[in-house]
Amino acid sequence: MSSFIIEGGESLKGTVRASGAKNAVLPVMAASLLAEGECVIEDVPELEDVRVMREVLSSLGAGCETKESSLKINPDNIDTCEAPYELVRKMRASFLVMGPLLAKYGRARISLPGGCAIGSRPIDLHLKGFSALGAEIDLGHGFVEARCEKLKGNIIYLDFPSVGATENIMMAAALAEGQTIIENAAKEPEIVDLANFLNSMGAHIRGAGTDIIKIEGVKSLKGISYTVIPDRIEAGTYLIAGAITNGDVLVENVVSEHLKPLIAKLIECGAEVTEGEDGIRVVGKGRPNPVDVKTMPYPGFPTDMQAQMMAYLSLCNGNSMIIETVFENRFMHVEELKRMGARIRIEGRSAMIEGVEKLSGAPVKATDLRAGAALILAGLAAEGTTEVMNAQHVDRGYENIVEKLRSIGAKIKRAE
Ligand SMILES: CC(=O)N[C@H]1[C@@H](OP(=O)(O)OP(=O)(O)OC[C@H]2O[C@@H](n3ccc(=O)[nH]c3=O)[C@H](O)[C@@H]2O)O[C@H](CO)[C@@H](O)[C@@H]1O
Ligand SMILES: C=C(OP(=O)(O)O)C(=O)O
């Protein structure tokens, strides 16, 4: 297992490009199963999660071919509708193949994903959606098995605007008979990207990006070429890297609109943020002002930026509070940040942060993807050496993180 070794205290300066979005490319890869013929996806980041999704698609019989950052997927020879535990346990997003398989082949047997470090993460809303579309669902032996003759459109109200459930239902409904309406749908940019991808394939989806999505089912979808949106969470992480090191960093390949909730908080913290044609530039201006942050579904502050924001606020000039409303257990980074000198107290879903003047380098452990990113940020700002263990979590979602950070002046390396 590898670690990141960081010598803190360098002010980061320069330009870094955000890659294609992990959370957009994974559902788009799953949706390629719906096509007749080949899809070509462009700007696909080289990530562990993308590799796992490729394995899932290959195990179903789809042809997958990677050439630089382009990925060809051909589902014409799918020969099984079963996704095994060995793959689904590695990545929850594997469950996104259920909607496409059910819609196109009338059956799917997918291992139950189970919980992970950030929460129990049930899939009840996905299943409720498939049932409403007419699928018969059986749970047993650790698998979800779903069958149907032909899915039929329906009105589905989601109790919570779940990103994955919205995506899975949207993909299933694209080939269902008649109209499906998803109410209280998730509004994340990745939902809009998936709808754009499906519509380019020939689907009829309106309203993606609002809380009511209407899908008129069509008979078939065709293979197309598509470029996924930039990764707003990766971009946000590099913006905080600039701010936390009192640096001057330009992040290219971003959609500013997608980063509004973070930009607003960075400005409130006192950082200088400029949104330009070429990207977003951040200039750090010393210790951040204390601010309160509450994670919410989009367009609220993203839960996937919460840990990184906490690393930044651990150095604030006063007291800040972060409330995590999306996942029930997403504070695993707190104990590790405390090992670096942060003063943070958890009360239920709130973290009270008493800003400190300095963090000190220490050996720490990444428990999940964004916790790992937060510890790297803390390490960049800390005095001395930080070792962030369990680099594999970070590799799930950050393409070439060592190279990108080094290119803007960070002293970071990977150790096996
Ligand atoms: C691959 C991907 O895109 N992952 C993102 C996606 O995850 P994911 O799609 O898993 O997140 P959801 O939006 O579904 O989950 C949000 C909340 O809803 C709950 N829930 C979800 C489904 C369900 O059937 N029942 C239920 O109770 C979850 O436990 C969680 O508390 O959105 C999250 C919220 O923005 C992000 O943190 C993840 O990075
Ligand atoms: C939680 C995340 O991803 P996943 O849903 O794949 O676990 C994330 O990207 O921060």
Image (cartoon, rainbow, N blue to C red):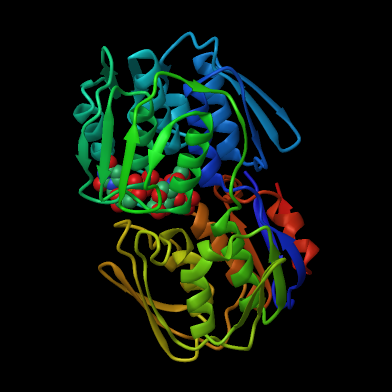
Residue appearing at x 51%, y 61% in the figure = 258
In this rendering, position of residue 19 left or right of residue 297: right
User: Residue 77, how many percent across, how many down?
Assistant: 54, 9
Query: Camera-side residue: 91 or 97?
Result: 97
Residue appearing at x 32%, y 24% in the figure = 176
Query: Camera-side residue: 415 or 49?
Result: 49
Answer above or below: position of 315 versus 240. Answer: below
Answer above or below: position of 285 versus 266. Answer: below
Which of the 4 image quadrants contains residue 156?
Answer: top left
User: Residue 218, how many percent across, how many down?
Assistant: 39, 24
Query: Residue 117, can we see it?
Result: no
Farthest-out residue, bottom:
318
Query: Camera-side residue: 306 or 186?
Result: 186
Query: Camera-side residue: 35 or 282?
Result: 35
User: Residue 94, how many percent across, how many down?
Assistant: 44, 32
Answer above or below: position of 366 versus 8. Answer: above
Residue appearing at x 76%, y 66% in the figure = 15
In this rendering, position of residue 122 left or right of residue 414: left
Query: Residue 281, can we see it?
Result: yes
